[in-house]
Structures are given as C-alpha cells and as structure tokens.
Amino acid sequence: FVYITFYLKCEAKHLGPSSGPTRPRDFSTFCTVNLDQEEVLRTQVCEKTLSPLYGEDFYFEIPRPFQCLSFYVYAKGVFQRDLPVGKVAIRKEDLSKLSGKENWFTLQSVDPNSEVQGKVHLEMKLNELITENGSVCHVCAVSRRIIACQGLPLISGQNCDPYATVMLVGPARSDQRKTKVKKKTSNPQFEETFFFEVDFCSCLLLLFRVDLWNNETMAPDVFLGETRVSLKILRNDHVHKAWYLLQPKGNGNKPKPEDLGSLRLNITYTEDIVLPSACYHCLRALVLQSPDVKPISASAAHILAEVCKEQYEAVLPVVKLLLHHNRLVPFVSSIAELELEQTQEANTIFRGNSLATRCIDDMMKIVGRSYLAVTLKPVLDEICESNKTCEIDPVKLKDGDNKEINKENLQCFVQKVFSSITQSSASCPPLMCDVFRSLRQMASRRFPADPHVQYSAVSSFVFLRFFAVAVLSPHTFQLRPHHPDPEVTRTLTLISKTIQTLGSWGSLSKNKLVGSTLLTECFAFDIITRACISTVVKKKKNEVQKRAQGRKRIGKRNFKKRWLRVTTQELSYHKQKGKEPLCVIPVKDILGVEKLEESAFKRKNMFQVIQSEKPLYVQAGNCVEVCEWIEVLSQVSRCNPGRLSVFHPSAFLMGAWQCCKAQNEGQPGCRPCSTATLANIQQLDIDCDRETEKIFTLFSSSHSNLQKMEDACASLSVYLGQQKEQEEYSAFTIQDPMETFQTVQQIQTALEELQGHHAAHGAAADEPGTILSIIIAIGPFGQKILESHQSWKMSNIKR
C-alpha cells in the first residue's frame, strides 16, 4: 500500500517569462497536484501577484500505480480557459529523496505534446518470403501486433477514446495503418495485427512508430504519446514481445528553456508494507481494549496520543480502527469525561484541540460526509453559482455596490443555510447522535447549575467544528469540486461566521444579534440540538403475531395478532391499528433484541425483545421483516446502559431453557449477543490491518517517549528507587502509574513481535528469485530505538 502525505506549504515566485513583450503584469494563479496527468488536488486562487503563497496542507493516499507526481501553476482566466504557466514534475523514484525537505524547483514549460503517460504492449516478427519455386526472395514481411495499452491519461476527467496509428518509417518510405477506436477506457485492448513488406537489405534502416491518440468529435484529436522501435532488434522467425513506455512527441526534443519562475514545495512521502492480518493481532487487541481500561489514560490509544510528537497523526488511525469495530463511542466518552474533569468553566467546554475534540472531529468527517452532502450541498451550489454580492464591510465595498442590497443577499443565504441545518436532524448519522447524547449527559453532570451547558457541549461540535467548517471550505468535504473564487469565498466566510455565532449560546445570551431578523430562527437551534441528542429513527409499524408474556406452555392460543409500533421512546403493541396500547415498553428498558430459534415454538421468523422481567416473543410476517424489526429495535436501544452480553436463543418452557437445558430461569444466556453495528459504519471502507500498521509505525517512531513514560511510571510507584523530578514526567497524563506501566510493557512486547514479522518478511523478500519492490526505511529514529531498546536486534533495525 502506498500513500502520500502532503504538507504543501506551496509558494511561487517570479512567475511568467522574465523578459520580452510577453512579460506579464500581476495576475491571479492557482496550483494543481497531478498523479501523472490526472488532477487530484487544487489550491485556492491567489489574486494579482507574481509571487503567490498558497500555504495549504494536503493529505491523500495513492490508489493506483503511477510514474510521476506533478505540480502545475495556472493563470486564472476570466473570459477564457485557464492558461498553464509552468510545471514541476517529480518521478516516483525521486520522491523518497525529497521527502520531509523543503526545496525550490524551477518551473518547466508545459508542452501538450510532452504531457504523456502510460505504456503499450507490442509484438513484432520478421519472416522471409518464399517464392512459388521455393527460392528465398529479397523481400520480407514484418508483422506488427498491437496488443493493449495501460495507464492512458484521463481527458477532462473522463476515460479517453484511444486509437493507435502504426507507421513504418525509413528512407523514402512512410506507411501508416490505424486501429479501431476503443470507447471510454484508459486500458484499451486492441489485439490488431498489421503486415508490412520491406526490402531485406533496407530492413536495418527502418523503424516502427506507434502513436496513441484520443478521438475527438468536435476538435482535433489529442496526442497521448508515442514509441519507436528499430527493426534492428528483429531476428528471422523470432517473436519480439515487450511493453514500451509512451514518450513525448519527437522523443522529447525541448526548446530553449525560459525562466518561468520557481515553486517551493514541502512533500512528505511514505510507503507502507501491510502484513497478513494475523501479524497485527496483539497490537490491534491492545488498541481495541482501550475503551475498557480504567483509567482511560492508561489505555494504549491514549498512550499513543501522549507519546506521539504530533498528536493529530495518532488520532485518525485510532479513530478508524475503533470505528470499524464499533468501539469508538465508549472511548470518546471516556476521554471526553477526562477532559471535563479538567474544565473549570462551562463556557470553555470542548473549545481546545484536545484528544477528545480531535477524535470527534475526525469521526464527524468520516461518518458525516453523506450527511453534509444531503444537508448543505444544494444550498452551497446555489450560493456558488449565483452572482450575488454579500460584502457588508464598508472598507471592502467596491464601486457601485449597495450595502443594503448586499445585506439582504447575505441574510437570505444565511437563512437558507441555517434552515437546511435545523431541518436535517432526521439525516444525522446515528453514531454522531450517540456521541452527542453522551456529551450532553456528561456536561450536565459536570455543570449541573448551568442549564445551557448540555447544548453548548453539542453546539461546539455540530456548529462550530462541523457545519461552519464545511460552509467555509466546501471543497474539503467534496461538496464542491474546487476552491470557489475569491468573491464567493468571502460570502462563504461571512455565512460561516454567522453560523458560528448562532451556534454559540454565549453569543446569543449576550444579545450580540439584536437588530438582526436572524434571531427569529434561534429557536431552531434547540430543535436541532435536541434532535441530535436522541437518535432519530423513523417509526415502524406492522401487524405481527405476539405470544402472551409469561406463559409456560406451548399452544396456538398463546399467539395473537397485534399491531406493533416503535418510536425513539417506546415500543408498544395494540389490539388494532389506531387503538389504545395494550402494553408499553420504554426503550430504555430493552436489554437486547435477538432472533429466536424456530424450534422454540415451532414457528418461523421469530424474534425476542429481552427485558428485565419477561421477554416479549414476536413473529414477523417474513424473514425480511424480522431483520428490519431487529435492526430498528437494536438501533434505538443500543446505548442502553444495561444491555446484555449473552442471551438464550430459545425459550424457557416446561421448567427449562430449551437451548442449554438449564433449569434456573434466571440463568445467564448461553450465546453471545449480536453487536448492533450502525448501518453507516458498515458502508465505510476501512482497512484495519492498514490502520494498525500506521499505529505500529507511530509507536516505533515515538519509542524514546514511550520509554520515558515507562520510566516515569516506574519512578512514581513501580520501583522503590529515588523519585525523579516532577518536570521529567509532567508532560504525560498518568493517573494510575501501575496500570499505565503494564500497558506500556504490553505495547513494547507487541512492537517487538510485529518488528519480528517485518524482519521475516524482509528476509523472505531477499531470497533468490524474489524481487523486493518497496524499501522500508526506519529513518532518523532508528538509532534512538536501538539505543533505548537493546533487545531489538541490529538485523531487525537494518531490515
């Protein structure tokens, strides 16, 4: 697996030709990041300067093989297309040499005929021609077979329509043939063969040229690359078959270079080897146990954040791993409670960049992306595509602008955005609702005298860190394809600031919005907050067969038709639709929802709602309804504190459980309960082995800090030696030195084991006949690891 991390502190200087009549004045520019010829990222536009500072951090993972990483600087066009100023191209093999360094690169000119990528698969054969009388003539036949191409570039973001031309080029000769056009593919399969007759004596002077083109309907065809092969390599009756990289037109003959300016880049490039899943069992288990460790500061996930030099690097892999295994909510609740213990004032709750806030931020970005698309994308598209000006700062008003009209435009846009947010509670992902509910409860317990703290705890995330950020930078959340232009960016900034103010209870309480009609919608803040605090599930109603609760015997009379209804608050059944409920079960009293074996009552499609008293046995209409009922009931009750971990898959009849034959009705269950996994988590593409490998790399690079934490724990309570000075371990949060010490030792054991697996993998790759295509470099921390942990063998470090 290969992924790139960009800290693209991108800066350019002296853009454009250095002299002559084409020397430009100041113009607006932007920079794109391309994998081969495919644009993957774009910076914002820098206005009217030849030395722009883009200053954006980019992170992305490479999903496919590539040859070159390129950076293009464009001059922003107003009434015409954007024009390329120059480019910097870095080949893949050079990235590791530049990683972690800041360099100035000279911009090269952009020639459409030199922008090529991909390769072509060719097969050639030379045959002598035999005459009818059996003699060998002086003419031979050359067959040229074009098999396929791979990695052709995208054209305007779409797969191209490629075809190939084949030319036999030589003295006084130029024969050309053409393949069929292959539609919408970057990896065409041609499988076409062409025959050429050549004079045997002139064969050594000839060469084949294959050009790849994109077929255009309303414009000239686009050149995709060429390759040239001399006939000298052919031998009689011998088949030559090989892949050839496509080259620029004319073998890349370049004109005299111009001084187009320079581009400063800071690139971090990382390559990972992900081992088989079994290799990560020990370390993965330690991280997944984190929510259960008391205190939470002694858990592996919390320790990772403590010892890492940059905490934000540790958060994302931990969040993804816990999220995949449905363990994120209890972990976030524990670290949030730890932060609340250290918070002295209610109005500063969750306002810093702590481990808890970073975890919740990353969680919202992962699971809330589709929520943002449903809620904000339509209104943001409208704002970005309109030409309405919203500037209200007198200093920034342009000639002809009317402040009152601009104010009305801004007010209209803010109302649309805020209405979209407040009406979106039904679309809020259940996982986010679970986290917000937990935050509300903890905040209320921590500051019982403040009635608004339960809302400000939620608003600090849902408004300030989620919606306001998405409005300000829609391209970051894939709500817009690129950065908006400067005028739209200013509009979005004003809307985002207003949303932040509306989401702040402190601002509202001080009447900072007096005089604005937006105050009329402040009541909606309470609606969205309360809706997010409770999981929103659509009501489900169906006619079912219900067994009378508490009956000990089997009989048809025990089952009756009832109308079953569930909301976020209660489960009830009725004699008929619209009638008063015969029984109401509060959702908070549900301890589990599981399928029931058919053998229990000799009935199919049964499930049970487990309570503290008697379970409720229900027969659904079909197998699909069973799954729907179990999913809905599990979702609304999944956060109940008393949920069971085991259950009985059958019924208690005739004095015994039919599944395990236990005669005590209060006997704990004999089968583990199924975990209520959220639907939106199931759809996430998370590679747990990959994330565990990242955690391993982070622990390894922070081994010296890990050792310091172990020494601090030993100094505090494990050993009876002389206590170290307070400042030597004050950088770490150590609530329970003994528990933390044990976890650190378990982490070190897991790291040693995983390091051994990597060493074995490296040894296997070095065996004869095996090519090691990726090099693992420990980097500058390798010597520190060796010095601080002598049990790691030198051979392993070298691997």
Image (cartoon, rainbow, N blue to C red):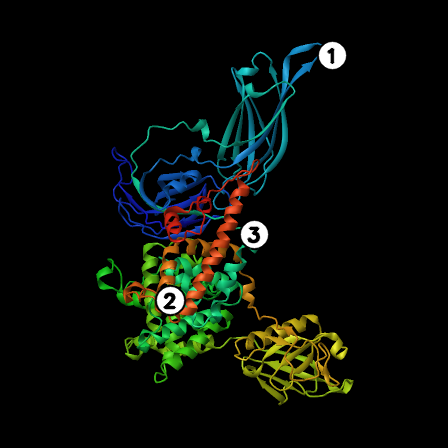
Q: Estimate the spatial distance between the alpha carbons at disc 2 and disc 3, rounded to whole Å.
A: 38 Å
Task: Give left or right: position of 405 versus 749.
Answer: left
The residue lying toward the viewer, choosing from 255 and 25, is 255
- The location of residue 553, given as percent across then percent down, is 76, 86
Residue beneath label 1, please?
132
Q: Amino acid at mark 3?
A: Pro
Whichever of callouts 2 and 3 sits on the residue coming sooner in the sequence is 3
Residue at image coords 44%, 78%: 530
Residue bearing the label numbered 2: 719
Q: Residue furthest left?
A: 395
Q: Nearer the viewer, residue 377 or 1?
A: 1
**Disc on the earlier residue, 3 or 1:** 1
Asked whether residue 616 is in view, the answer is yes
Residue 631 appears at what percent x and percent y?
Answer: 60, 72
Give the CA distance from mark 2 to mark 1.
100 Å
Asked if residue 409 can be seen in this view, the reply is no
- For label 1, the SS is loop
Residue lying farthest to the front in this orientation:
721
Looking at the image, is mark 2 or mark 3 nearer the viewer?
A: 2
Disc 3: which residue: 276
